[in-house]
């Protein structure tokens, strides 16, 4: 069994897959494409294709792919000769996929901030070259427009989904405070939010006293942060466990029909930061 991920494999998603395979006496081979570290679409495409070439050369019973790990090379999933499950929003029904509704999840957190009275809201997006950044950005800004809340271009910062860009975003946010006076910020990924929270603390910025913070993602690594972050999404372990079930259904022959697409509902967890 192989798992193709786009970041460090020691994640809740990875642990859930490992636990499920260990219980049944199966092994897992992990490939890491590290795509958030790539700065452009071409590099991301080449990274994904290189990994697929290695998988074709080996003996793999099944493959589970984490979202963004194969951006630009998804069409090649049909050529691997083994069942494949994609965790995330697959553009076309090439193979089975399981995901959460990123747009609806993001609208949930946007409405939450608006209901708390925030009208000057900063926004840290994901990198423009990764497809999963767009539904979060569009849904968040769409919710602001629907509520009559202005979108201020100077209060939008493009991050990389990595913690380092969250720290840079914190410095950027502090620079914007005198002119634009934002009262809240939405961060499009949990690693960025962790980096931001640490840097804001170092800069003497109180959360939520000086700025309210909410993030996309339900990673259990957020449980260590204080104050507790308001977050939205679906637990990575839920997605991983369902992906493993779907893969086993293909391997056993229980499921032989056309590619399936399943969506697991997300939830908003209101913490102490909003």
Image (cartoon, rainbow, N blue to C red):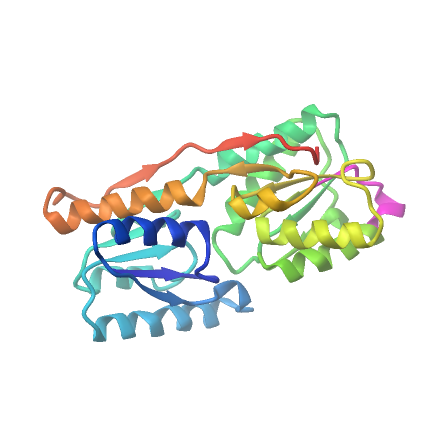
Q: What's the residue at 39%, 63% (across, down)? A: 72
The answer to whether residue 93 is seen in the rendering is: no
Residue shown at the point (52%, 69%) measured from the top left: 38
The residues colored magenta run 176-185
Give the x, y percent position of residue 263: 36, 36
- Give the camera-side residue of 181 and 59: 59
Residue 190, compared with residue 4, is above or below; it is above
Q: Is residue 179 magenta?
A: yes
- Residue 154 drawn at (x, y percent): 76, 50
What is the number of callouts on the image? 0
Left or right: 43 as drawn, with respect to 240: right
Residue closer to the observer: 137 or 86: 86
Q: Is residue 60 left or right of residue 43?
A: left
Seen in the picture, residue 160 relative to 267 is either above or below; the reply is: below
Residue drawn at point x = 25 percent, y = 51 percent: 95
Rendering quarter of residue 71: bottom left
Q: Is residue 107 visible?
A: yes
Instruction: Please give left or right for residue 270 compared with residue 156 in the image.
Output: left
- Work out which quarter of the rendered image holds the C terminus and state it: top right
């Amino acid at each position: 069994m192989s798992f193709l991920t786009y970041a460090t494999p020691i994640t809740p998603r990875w642990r859930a897959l490992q636990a499920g395979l260990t219980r049944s006496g199966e092994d897992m081979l992990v490939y890491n494409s590290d795509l958030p570290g790539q700065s452009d679409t071409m590099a991301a495409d080449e990274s994904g294709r290189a990994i697929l070439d290695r998988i074709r050369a080996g003996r793999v019973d099944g493959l589970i792919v984490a979202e963004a790990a194969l951006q630009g090379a998804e069409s090649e999933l049909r050529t691997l000769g083994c069942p494949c499950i994609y965790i995330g929003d697959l553009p076309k029904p090439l193979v089975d996929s399981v995901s959460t509704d990123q747009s609806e999840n993001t609208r949930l957190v946007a409405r939450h901030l608006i209901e708390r009275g925030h009208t000057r809201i900063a926004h840290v997006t994901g990198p423009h070259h990764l497809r999963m950044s767009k539904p979060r950005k569009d849904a968040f800004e769409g919710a602001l427009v629907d509520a009559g809340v202005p979108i201020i271009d100077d209060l939008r910062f493009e991050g990389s989904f990595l913690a380092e860009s969250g720290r840079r975003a914190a410095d950027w946010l502090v620079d914007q405070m005198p002119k634009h006076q934002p009262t809240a910020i939405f961060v499009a990924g949990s690693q960025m939010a962790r980096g931001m929270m640490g840097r804001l603390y170092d800069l003497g910025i109180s959360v939520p006293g000086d700025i309210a913070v909410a993030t996309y993602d339900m990673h259990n690594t957020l449980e260590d942060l204080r104050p507790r972050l308001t977050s939205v999404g679906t637990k990575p372990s839920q997605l991983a466990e369902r992906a493993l079930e779907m893969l086993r259904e293909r391997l056993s022959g229980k499921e032989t029909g056309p590619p399936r697409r399943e969506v697991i509902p997300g939830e908003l967890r209101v913490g102490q930061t909003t």
